[in-house]
Image (tube, helix red, strand yellow):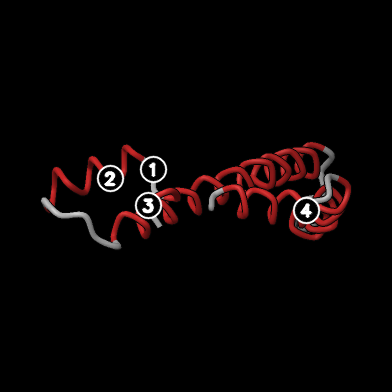
Amino acid sequence: MARVRRARDVALQRRIAGRDARSQKILSELKAGFAIGAVLFLPFLLIDIVTASITTSIGMFQLPPVVVSTPLKILLFVMVDGWNLLAGSLLKSF
């Protein structure tokens, strides 16, 4: 279990709690999860912003941007082989 913990996380835990416990593993996994979440969230946020600005600029105020952006998000996720990238980054964190 010691090899999957990051050295900075171990140093932080020792500095705060003064002990080497399972909480370093939890801290490392939370850090990896937040990093993966940010990598997934930012491109989808960009797609939302672009589709909202395009639909507003062409005067389609009654059309919710989600109707246009959701298929684009799914298409992007499938085109970049998102499941493989997601599973690969999860397995690399171990």
Residue at 88% over, 47% down: 79
Q: Nearer the viewer, residue 87 or 81?
A: 87
Look at the numbered discs 1 and 2 and tell me whether their residues touch, using CB distance below 8 Å.
Answer: yes
First-in-chain label (1 vs 4): 1
Mark 1 to mark 4 CA distance (whole Å): 24 Å
- Secondary structure category for the residue under label 4: helix
Q: Mark 2 = which residue? A: 10
Q: Mark 3 = which residue? A: 2
Q: Is residue 73 left or right of residue 44?
A: right
- Secondary structure category for the residue under label 3: helix
Q: Is residue 86 left or right of residue 69?
A: left
Give the amino acid type for the residue marked by disc 3 in the picture: Ala
Look at the numbered discs 1 and 3 and tell me whether their residues touch, using CB distance below 8 Å.
Answer: no
Q: Nearer the viewer, residue 68 or 45?
A: 45
First-in-chain label (3 vs 4): 3
Is 43 situated above or below 22? above
Q: Mark 1 = which residue? A: 6
The disc at residue 84 is 4
Q: Position of residue 64 (x, y in %)?
A: 75, 58
Q: Quadrant of residue 45?
A: top right
